[in-house]
Structure formats: C-alpha cells, structure tokens
Image (spheres, grey):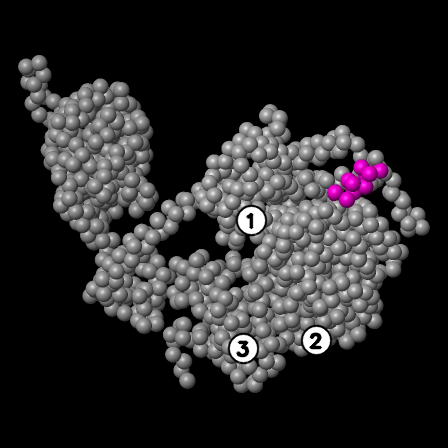
C-alpha cells in the first residue's frame, strides 16, 4: 500500500492482506464465543464481529511508534495492531502468559512493546489518557500519532468533550476513532444524543472530522491514512467516525431486546468481510482453494492460541502483590 | 595455733563454703558430720575435693568411714601429713 | 462424534432451559447456525453451533432445565476424524482444571457453597447457645473489667487481680497502676507479708501433691536390690579419681531405671485430660532438696541414652545450679518420670507421690547392709530398696513388678551401664 | 542569612522549580497555575520562568486534565498536576483510582505512571461544606498510590522533592491553613525519608498520632498537658500510605495509650484504621481503649463558631487525654 498525493492506490496483494486480517479477527471472536459457552473464558466478553473493517483499516495508517488506546470491545484492535493471538487468548484464560499476566482479562489487554495501552472498562475512560500521551509526544518532539478508539456511547460522557477541547486547544497529534455501531449496550443513539452525527460534535471543537462507511475497509484505511498524514504535518487532532454495526449482542449475556432481528440481517448483508470477498471473487482475484487455504491458516493460528492458553499456568498467588508499586516488582 | 586448730579452721571454712547456713559452732566434733549438717553425698564429695586442694591429702572411698566426724577427719589428715 | 452442551452466557448463570429446538435428528447444520433458543433469567438467547455436521440425536426436550455443560445433543461432524474441531473437548475446562498454584485454588479449597452455608448456619446456632451460657456465668459472678496491659503485668508479678475490689480506670476498671499498687502494698506491709519464696514453694508443693493424691489411683510396689556388684564396679572406677570426678551409686541406679523404662512406655509419659500420652524419650526427673527447705525436681533429658559417667556429671551440675536458683525453666517442667532418693542417711525405704501429669515415681531407700541368702548361704550384702508408685489408670502391678525386676537385672551387670 | 524565613507555599514552589530545572520532563498543569499564579499562589512566577509550555493552565475539566496528566506520565513525562482542592478532585476520582492506581498492576507491570497530584485539603477558612472536606483517607484506601501529608515547611520543601523522584503515582495533600505558616530556611537533613513517621515530641503517658493540619493543634495540646505533668508523645504520620506502623506500635508499647487526631469524619476515618491496627498489634500493651478526636459527623458549616465546634480543636484533644488518664484536672 503506498500513498502519493494522498490518493490511495491499493494493490491486490494488500487487499487480500486486509481480507485475511478481518477474517483472523472474525474467526478469533467466533472461537471466543464458543470457549465462553464452555466456561473457558469468564467475566465479560464483548465481540468485535461486524466491526472488523474499522480496526483493520485504521491500523494500516499507523507506524510502530504510534500509540493505540482500545475499548473493552478490543480484541479486533489488539489483533489488528499485531498482538499475538497466543497472548490475547491466554489473557482471557486468565493465564500468567497472557498479555497482562492474566490480571486484566478481555477488557484490559496491554502490550507496551506494540504501544497498545489497553482496553478500558470505563466508557470514555481512556480519552484523557490518549490526550495526555499526545501531549507528552508533543512536548518531547516525537512526531507520533496517538489513536484512541471509542464507541458512540462515549460521546455522552463529559470526558469526551473535555478531551476534544484539550486536544484542539493544545493542537495535539491525536486521531479519535469513533466506532458508531448504533447502540450503547441497549440504548440506541437516537434516544441518547440530540446531535447524532458524532463528527459534527468534533467539528464544533475545531477538529478535522468526517464520517465513513465503517463496513468498507478500504474507505476506512484511506480516510485514516489521510488524517494521520495531516496529524504528522502538525495540523492538529482529527476525528474519524466509522458507521458500523455489531452482529452480536453487547456482551455474551444479552437478549438483544432493544433491536429487531431483521435489522441485524440487513447489516450482515453489508458485512465487511462478505463485501470484500464478493469484490475479490467478482474480479477473479480469490479462487476457492486459495480461500480455503486462508481459512485453514487462520484456523491453525487460532487453535495454536487456544492450546497455548489452555496449557499455560496461572499466576502464582504469592505474586499477587507484585506490581502494585514500582519497588515491589520482582 | 597448733596444727589441730588450723586444720579445724580450714575444714570449718570449707564446710561453710558448701553449706553457708550450717551451724558449725554448736557442732559436736564427735557427732556424724553429714548427719548434723545435713550434707548429702554430693556436698560431701565437694568437701573432700576442697580438702584435697587445700591440704594435698586425697581421702579415698575406702577411708570414708574414718572421716565421719570432725575430730576423726582432723586426726586422719594430721596422720597423713 | 461431538456433544453439544448447555451453553453458559455469563458467570452468574448456573442453569438454562431449552425453550425451543430449531433442528431435529438428521438435519445438516453449518458453523454459526442457530440450533436452539435458551431461556435465561434475562430472557431468550439463541444458541449457535460451532461446527459443520449432522445432528445425530437430541437428548434434551423442550422446556427442560439443565445445568451448564449438561449434554443436550450429539453432532456427527462431516469428516468423522476431524481432529481440529474437537481439540477443545480434550482440554479440561478452566473450572475443572486443577493447576498446582493458581488463583482458583484459593477458592477451590473452600467447602462447596451450600456446605459452607450449612456450616455457618449450625455454627451460628452453637455460637448463640454458648453466648447465652456466658451471659449466665457473667451474671453470676461480678464482671471485673481489667485492661490487657494490667492483665499481663498481673501475670508477670504474680498478683491475683481478681481479689481487687475495683480499679482506678473508667467504671472502676483495673489498670496498670492498680496492679503496681497492689504489688508494692503487698511487699511493704509487715502484717500481710508477701509470702517468702520458700512459703510460696511449700504452697505449690501442697496443692500439687494433694491434687495428685485426689486424682491419681496409686498402686505401690517395692523390691530390695543387691548393690554389691555395682559398688565393687564403682570402687574400681573411682579408685584413682579426685573426689569431684567420683561416681555415686545413685547415678548407677538412675541409669538402670532410665534404660529399663525404654521397654515400659506405660510408666514414662503424661496423663492429660483423660488421655495418656507415652513419652518417646525418658526425661528423668530427680528430686533435689534445697538447703532452705523444699525440693525441686530437675529433669535429665534423654537419660536412657546417657552413660553413667555422663549422667553423674548432669546430676552434679543440676544439684549445684538448683541450690543457686539457676535451673532453667525447661529443666524444671519437662520430667516424664521421677526418682526420689532418701539419700544414704535416710530411711530404709520410701514410697512417693506421683507428680501429675506423670504416671509413675520411684523411691530409693538408703543403701544398707543386711543378711542375704546366696545359694542357701547367708552372706553380708549391701542392699537398696527401690519402690515404684504408678497410676492404675495406665498400668498394673504385674507390669510394674516386671519393670522392677528389669532394673534389678541391669544393676547386676553394672559395667554395661558405664 | 540563617534567620531567613520560608513560607510553606514558597517551600513547595522551591521544590517544583528545582525539579523543573533539573529535568525537562517535569511540568506543571492545573487550573490557574500559570497566569493567575496558582489559587494558593504556590506557582506564582513560574510561568514567567518556564513559559506556558511547561506551566500549563487547563480548562475546568478535572477528569480531562488529570487523565491527561496520567497519560503524559505513561508517555514518559514527569507531570505535576495541581487540583485546586480535594473537593474538586471528586470529579477526577475515576482517572486516579481506575487508571493511575490500577494500570501498572493490571497491565502485568508493563506501564509506569510517575505522577504527583497535589491538592489543598481541610477546613478552617469558613468556606462551608463543599470547600472544606478532609478526604485524605479516600485515597489512602487505594493500593497503587502513595499518599503524603506534609505538616511543616521543611517537609513541604523536601517531601515534594522526594515525591517527584518516586516512580509511583503520589497524592500530595497540603492543608489550607498551612500555606501561610513560615519557618527558618530548611535543609535536607531536617526531612527524613517521606515514608516514615516522625516523633515530634517524645513522652511516656500517651501517644498522640496525627498529620497535616492537625499537628500544630496536637503540639499545643501536648504543651498544655505537660503543665499538668502528663507526658505526651506526639507522632506526625507524614505518610498516610504506606503507614509507618513500626513507629506507631513502638510508641504505644511504651505509653500504653493512643489518641488519634484526624480532621476527617469519624466513620471510615484514617483514625479508625490506626485504632484497628493498634488493637490488633498492641493489644497486650493497651491500658486504655484507643480513641479518636475527629470531625463531628455533619457537613462543615460556614460560621466560625460552628466550624470550630465541628473540627478537632486543642481543648477537645486536652479533654480527651484527661478523660483517658482519668486524672481530674485541678481547675
């Protein structure tokens, strides 16, 4: 993928890469659902199924040194950012080999080497942190982008407004990515926000902002790349609103009384993976055997992760106090 | 102070070391020393040890019955001097 | 073959009701299809299947409530030996896994929830009844408040604070100052003089022996033992030793007793709260008479493993220290059996009173010359009377007699004891 | 120049200035810390010295700028965040408790958050209930943060410097009545390690344990009690988390009595925690129940006579000690 005069030219190899990345997330989340019903994964589990294009698209625009703040629906963010499935799965099994030594679980995956500063279980809780990290980068003249994912539910929190204001006030190198999937748990956007176009709220704070089809990975990637490009040029913070949809409940214990089934079906037809697969096949770029080969590779990566997580040990109870304070670390 | 009196003084002092509350003055020199002063066998051995160090005379086990009273003890030591 | 089980949709969900089947035996299904609807406390949730295959059989009926993980259907996957799909089955689930040290073990070793509730319920019943008893007791005798520090100081100084009518603390509570005052007052006032150590010891001995007499069913045995072999052996040994190195015959007798006791556990141990606990080793208590009156029992530890020479050294050392008040607490309290000797100027024989919680005590008379029959001829012999008083709850005369004979036998071969 | 005086606020400013000169990564952010010079004038003049890029005035968005401070610490900076008073910190509790205190442990020790969050605290200026809270114990309850309460000019000067070198998030409480206090120019030796308590005055009859704004009242009570030959030991906690329990226990083992003076409300107070610790660890040394002088359980009222009636005062401390020693005063 190369960007010149910020018009994105995509070659087929890159599009297949995007397809496989989304498929890796999709199959990973399906396996998590299965493991949850067998009580292998506990606590809360929020699946990213349906929103894969957002994470995969945005991550293409980021450099290794850029930072990412996820949400509690963060498996897609983590995998698209390049965290190993082994570590993510082990974290959900609560094992010490997990990305956070098993202490955080599905909603708190950390990997500082990948500059992945975790999910956050407090809605909008990470927005001020992202602003702060961008402030630190600016003060240390590091020309990196901080990317902060959040759902449209977060815009109702004061921290959203405080953070966007601070970001623009201090011209910080930060890309806000709003995954607008229409529902904050059971609350449809229409019954919680007077202004339902989230990017308009950002424009009011002076941020460059617009909305894209969150189901179109190519469109998401090109929009994210353009914004990162302008941010790296010092043109200040931006907000990208991705209109998307989650095909599963808010979490595993969700009877989805708040929406009707055919709305879900409508969105499934426009699903990000189905859409790209249709395009590739229509252009003769994805033969059946190549597809099943991709599926097998993905299945193998996932089964290896499950096996790794299953046989990993738990953290020893005697290490419980390590890491509460800096001096007690070994 | 002839030899007998010095020996009596020595023995009296050694006894008092072992049994400070012993009533030496009213002791009849011919009465059984251990009976009168309630010295048990361990005390008696400590006394003989002290006497051996002080007088150079070691009283063997077989001679125990020759030193039962203060008077006989003095006579025995004098005879060995 | 793969078993479909009742799925869990949340950790707070113990069971699920199979509201409706969307498939029947023989139907082919593919991964992600909805095969049933599950009724949960939050409402209906669709259950998907995670593999392609053919429904072999349904084992749960509609409306049936089942535990999480209970089998509800059998699925024959398309290629029967498809390893990858049932990798999950082989691994045990997090809950049932039994890792050595993990956060789960902290919860696993607690009793199962319902047992735990049962325990706490009947604990609560017991606690209530105990509480009411305590209230009864408290009503009966006047409750006297005392501060923890005062209670500790009273114990240290041996002041019986229960005799104080009231204290200077809040609501008459007894505090440190009251204990110090009581202690000092007792020391100064001539009339109610503080008991001298000797008087306190006499009091202690009095309470001890009367309790022993009251509680322990004593039986008594006595045996005269020929001492000449032992005396001859000792005179050879002591011949050219300085007095302080010489071995007393008592040490020889103590050693014989200690070794004999190894084979008679019922005479060497502790009887506490209706239970007899034999001692693995012989801590031989021996009574030391103090010149200022009273006796102290010092224990020679592991006496059965000491040679006579070693035992004599310990004896000499303990007697000297006892008379200077230097015995260690452990030496005074740890005897598992006791010997009381009248000494070479005392009575011919002596019967003693057992020191609780021990279960036996030996009494040695004074070695004495007397006529003795050896092979039908009368000879002059030196003899000592060894008496045994023992606790009939633990042993009986027959084994006591065999013990005395064992001691006698050992004393006839004294060189073995050296 | 040895009689030169230094105020509590100037001591804080010196510590900040010294840290900012020594390390580029140190910067101050908070409401009115720049142009206004700080609501308690702690940062007066710093904006001229270091410029608005390092003395950052923030909008009234406590959760926003405290969270930003925490994020900057994650990003490698050494921020000092000033929250005007503990009363406004309630809006930032989520960022402090769920992010600053938690992320190191929850991330499996990957993320470090070296930040100092300063706040004014306490009553005494007739600011009424919403501006007079003493909530130090809310923060001292949370594992993952350290909590300090300097009561003297020397401690303000050097405990802040130590806090700025500590790799953990530190909550730094400055009692409002202390800013105007002044003392001779302190030297580092005046200030032991920030984690340890300090016996300000030794005594034998009773241990008075206190911190921050209550120290001066406690020392005055000790002075009055000395005239009735009651020998009082005064311990200044200085660190509320971790607590220097060794110093406290040694004192109680000696005096057999404990009185804690704490401006928080009785219920759930730090004083309650201290009494529990002493009851558990010094039970057999106690000759009287451990007791507390705390604030009455009412919102702090505006009028002076009521504010004084609610908060710990010297007379209350003296009466409590006398009651405990059951020595009727002569008067």
Q: Is residue C396 left or right of residue D240?
A: left
**D141, C172: nearer the viewer:** D141
Residue A298 screen position, x and y as percent: 71, 35
Secondary structure beneath dot 2 equals loop
Given contact means CB atoms under 8 Å apart, are the residues at marks 1 and 2 in contact?
no
Residue A277: say if magenta: yes
Q: Is residue C57 visible?
A: yes
Q: Residue furthest right?
A: A5
Q: In the rendered view, tell whether residue C369 sits above or below residue A243.
A: above
The crowd level at tag 2 (other Cα within 10 Å; few <14, some 14-19, many 20+) is: some
Q: CA distance from mark 2 to mark 3?
A: 23 Å
Q: Is residue C305 left or right of residue C201?
A: right
- Residue pictured at 61% horizontal, 62% vertical: D147
Which labelled disc corresponds to residue C45? 1
Q: In the rendered view, tell whether residue A69 sits above or below residue C330.
A: below
Marked residue chain, label 2: D
């Amino acid at each position: 993928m190369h960007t010149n005069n910020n018009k994105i030219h995509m070659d087929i190899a890159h599009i297949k890469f995007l397809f496989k990345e989304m498929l890796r997330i999709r199959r990973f989340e399906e396996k998590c659902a299965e493991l949850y019903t067998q009580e292998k994964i506990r606590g809360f589990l929020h699946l990213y199924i349906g929103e894969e294009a957002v994470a995969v698209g945005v991550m293409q625009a980021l450099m290794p040194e850029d930072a990412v703040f996820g949400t509690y629906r963060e498996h897609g963010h983590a995998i698209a950012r390049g965290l190993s499935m082994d570590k993510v799965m082990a974290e959900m099994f609560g094992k010490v080999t997990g990305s956070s030594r098993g202490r955080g679980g599905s909603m708190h995956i950390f990997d500082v080497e990948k500059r992945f500063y975790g999910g956050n279980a407090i809605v909008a809780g990470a927005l001020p942190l992202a602003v702060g990290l961008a402030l630190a980068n600016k003060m240390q003249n590091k020309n990196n982008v901080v990317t902060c994912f959040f759902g449209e539910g977060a815009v109702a929190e004061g921290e959203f407004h405080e953070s966007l204001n601070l970001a623009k006030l201090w011209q910080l190198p930060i890309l806000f990515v709003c995954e607008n999937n229409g529902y904050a748990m059971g609350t449809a956007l229409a019954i919680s926000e007077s202004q339902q176009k989230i990017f308009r709220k950002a424009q009011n704070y002076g941020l460059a902002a617009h909305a894209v089809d969150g189901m179109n990975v190519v469109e998401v990637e090109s929009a994210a790349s353009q914004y990162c490009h302008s941010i790296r040029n010092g043109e200040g913070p931006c907000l990208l609103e991705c209109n998307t949809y989650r095909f599963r409940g808010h979490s595993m214990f969700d009877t989805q009384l708040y929406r009707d089934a055919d709305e879900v079906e409508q969105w499934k037809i426009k699903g990000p993976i189905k859409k790209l697969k249709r395009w590739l096949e229509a252009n003769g770029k994805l033969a059946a055997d190549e597809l099943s080969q991709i599926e097998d590779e993905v299945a193998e990566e996932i089964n290896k992760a499950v096996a790794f997580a299953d046989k990993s040990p738990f953290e020893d109870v005697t290490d419980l106090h390590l890491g509460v304070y800096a001096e007690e670390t070994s | 102070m002839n030899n007998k009196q010095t020996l009596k003084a020595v023995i009296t002092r050694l006894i008092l070391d072992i049994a400070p509350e012993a009533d030496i003055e009213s002791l009849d020199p011919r009465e059984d020393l251990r009976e009168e002063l309630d010295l048990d066998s361990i005390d008696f051995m400590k006394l003989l040890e002290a006497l051996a160090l002080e007088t150079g005379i070691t009283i063997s086990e077989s001679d125990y019955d020759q030193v039962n009273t203060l008077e006989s003890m003095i006579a025995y030591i004098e005879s060995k001097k | 073959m793969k078993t479909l089980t009742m799925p869990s949709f949340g950790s707070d969900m113990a069971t699920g009701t199979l509201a409706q089947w969307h498939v029947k035996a023989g139907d082919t299904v593919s991964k992600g299809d909805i095969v049933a609807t599950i009724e949960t406390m939050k409402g209906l949730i669709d259950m998907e299947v995670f593999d392609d295959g053919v429904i072999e059989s349904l084992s749960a009926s509609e409306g049936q409530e089942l535990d999480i993980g209970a089998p509800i259907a059998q699925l024959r996957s398309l290629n029967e030996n498809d390893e990858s799909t049932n990798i999950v089955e082989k691994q045990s689930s997090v809950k049932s896994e039994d890792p050595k040290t993990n956060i789960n073990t902290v919860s696993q070793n607690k009793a199962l929830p319902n047992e735990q509730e049962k325990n706490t319920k009947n604990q609560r019943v017991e606690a209530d009844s105990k509480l009411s008893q305590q209230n009864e007791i408290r009503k009966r005798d006047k409750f006297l408040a005392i501060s923890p520090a005062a209670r500790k100081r009273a114990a240290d100084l041996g002041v019986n604070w229960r005799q104080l009518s009231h204290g200077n603390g809040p609501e008459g509570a007894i505090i440190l100052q009251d204990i110090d005052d009581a202690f000092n007052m007792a020391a100064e006032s001539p009339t109610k003089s503080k008991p001298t150590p000797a008087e306190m010891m006499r009091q202690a001995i009095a309470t001890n022996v009367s309790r022993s007499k009251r509680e322990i069913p004593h039986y008594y045995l006595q045996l005269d033992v020929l001492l000449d072999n032992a005396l001859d052996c000792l005179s050879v040994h002591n011949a050219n030793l300085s007095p302080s190195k010489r071995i007393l015959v008592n040490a020889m007798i103590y050693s014989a007793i200690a070794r004999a006791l190894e084979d008679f556990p019922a005479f060497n141990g502790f009887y506490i709260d209706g239970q007899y606990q034999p001692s693995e080793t012989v801590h031989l208590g021996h009574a030391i008479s103090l010149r200022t009156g009273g006796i102290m029992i010092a224990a020679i530890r592991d006496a059965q493993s000491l040679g006579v020479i070693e035992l004599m050294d310990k004896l000499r050392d303990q007697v000297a220290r006892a008379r200077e008040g230097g015995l260690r607490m452990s030496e005074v309290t740890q005897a598992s059996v006791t010997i009381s000797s009248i000494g070479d100027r005392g009575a011919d024989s002596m019967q003693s009173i057992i020191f609780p919680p021990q279960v036996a005590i030996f009494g040695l008379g004074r070695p004495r010359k007397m006529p003795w029959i050896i092979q039908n001829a009368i000879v002059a012999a030196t003899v000592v009377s060894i008496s045994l008083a023992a606790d009939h709850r633990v042993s009986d005369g027959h084994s006591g007699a065999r013990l005395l004979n064992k001691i006698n036998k050992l004393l006839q071969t004294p060189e073995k004891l050296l | 120049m040895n009689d030169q005086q230094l105020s509590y606020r100037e001591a804080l400013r010196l510590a900040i200035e010294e840290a900012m000169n020594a390390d580029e990564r140190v910067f101050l952010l908070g409401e009115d810390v720049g142009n206004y010079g700080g609501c308690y004038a702690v940062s007066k003049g710093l904006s001229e010295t270091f410029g608005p890029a390092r003395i950052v005035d923030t909008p009234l968005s406590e959760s926003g700028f405290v969270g930003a401070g925490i994020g900057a610490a994650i990003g490698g900076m050494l921020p000092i965040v000033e929250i005007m008073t503990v009363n406004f910190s309630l809006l930032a509790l989520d960022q402090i408790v769920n992010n600053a205190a938690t992320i190191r442990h929850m991330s499996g020790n990957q993320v470090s958050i070296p930040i100092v969050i300063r706040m004014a605290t306490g009553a005494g200026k007739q600011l009424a209930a919403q501006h007079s809270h003493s909530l130090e114990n809310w923060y001292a309850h949370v594992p993952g943060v350290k909590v300090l309460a300097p009561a003297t000019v020397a401690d303000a000067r050097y405990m802040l410097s130590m806090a700025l070198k500590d790799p953990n998030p530190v909550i730094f409480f400055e009692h409002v009545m202390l800013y105007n206090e002044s003392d001779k120019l302190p030297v580092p030796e005046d200030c032991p390690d920030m984690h340890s308590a300090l016996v300000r005055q030794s005594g034998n009859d009773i241990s008075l344990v206190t911190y921050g704004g209550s120290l001066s009242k406690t020392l005055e009570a000790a002075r009055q009690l000395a005239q009735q030959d009651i020998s009082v030991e005064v311990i200044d906690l200085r660190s509320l988390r971790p607590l220097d329990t060794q110093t406290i226990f040694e004192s109680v083992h000696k005096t057999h009595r404990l009185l804690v003076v704490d401006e928080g409300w009785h219920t759930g107070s730090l004083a309650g925690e201290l009494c529990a610790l002493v009851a558990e660890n010094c039970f057999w040394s106690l000759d009287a129940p451990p007791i507390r002088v705390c604030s009455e359980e009412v919102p702090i009222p505006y009028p002076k006579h009521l504010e004084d009636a609610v908060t710990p005062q010297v007379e209350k401390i003296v009466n409590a000690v006398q009651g405990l020693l059951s020595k009727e005063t002569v008067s």
